[in-house]
Amino acid sequence: MRRLPLWLKLVWTIWLMIWVPVYWNRYGPQNFLYFCDLGNLLIGLALWTENALLFSWQAVGLLLFQTLYIIDLAGAAFSGRHIIGGTEYMFDPHIPLPIRLLSLFHLVTPPLLLWAVCRLGYDPRGWKCETLMTWLVLPVNYFWRPQYNINWARGLFMREQHVVPGPLYLIAYLTAVPLLVYYPTHLCLKHWTRGRNTKADHMEELK
């Protein structure tokens, strides 16, 4: 039985077919190592497979950061000030408007992930998968084309830091983000979906 609507799967797939070549041509392959961009591809796979682990994995990794993105974008749009930073490019007239509009997927991702986790249930292995992906991807970001500082691998807010040695910063990042972001998000999602997961499991037993 299909639990996610077909129209949503088709819309996301068609959007990916537009977004991937445009971004590849504009920003190059390294841009697809951003966690949010990797998330787009994994969400596409999750939609078609209706896999709770994939959705949980992306929810743990993206919900906080995408929400902060939305706050910063909204703050800049209404007040002209970037509260957090990271969305300045959305107001850069040198970047074609259609490309900036494609980046509005950040607004869709959090509600989509919450809805999917609510619908399919939360898989507690998600935070471990996100941690493993971070440990694999971030060192690549650190060494490959470091001038792009993908995922802030060399410093926060798109600026390379020089306060501590680079390798020490990288180790701190690989330790702090799973402990301070992924695991607390995991606990919140686990608590939020506890009753829903129990109900879903009961319905499966009745089938």
Image: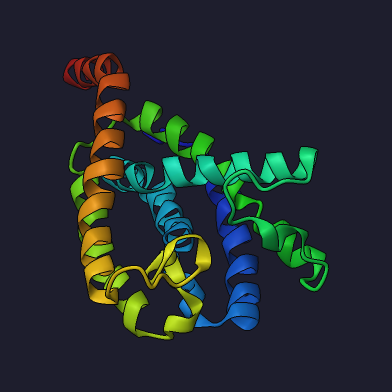
Quadrant for the C terminus in the image: top left
Name the residue at 29% across, 69% down: 164
Q: Is 99 placed left or right of 123 in the picture?
A: right
Residue 7 appears in the figure? no
Q: How many marks?
A: 0
Please tell me which residue lies in front, 33 or 147.
147
Q: Measured from the top left, where is residue 121 in percent x and y? A: 30, 29
Q: Is 110 placed left or right of 100 in the picture?
A: left
Work out whether 5 lies above or below 39: above
Residue 145 appears in the figure? yes
Name the residue at 45% across, 73% down: 149
Q: Measured from the top left, where is residue 196 in percent x and y? A: 30, 17
Q: Is 162 placed left or right of 78 in the picture?
A: left
Work out whether 155 lies above or below 147: above
Here the colouring is rainbow
Work out whether 164 lies above or below 148: above
Q: Measured from the top left, where is residue 111 in percent x and y? A: 52, 34
The answer to which quarter of the image holds residue 26 is bottom right
Quadrant for the N terminus in the image: top left
Please tell me which residue lies in front, 105 or 205.
105
Name the residue at 24% across, 49% down: 178
The answer to which quarter of the image holds residue 185 is top left
Q: Is 36 placed left or right of 128 in the picture?
A: right
Name the residue at 34% across, 77% down: 142
From this viewpoint, which residue is outermost toward the front? 163
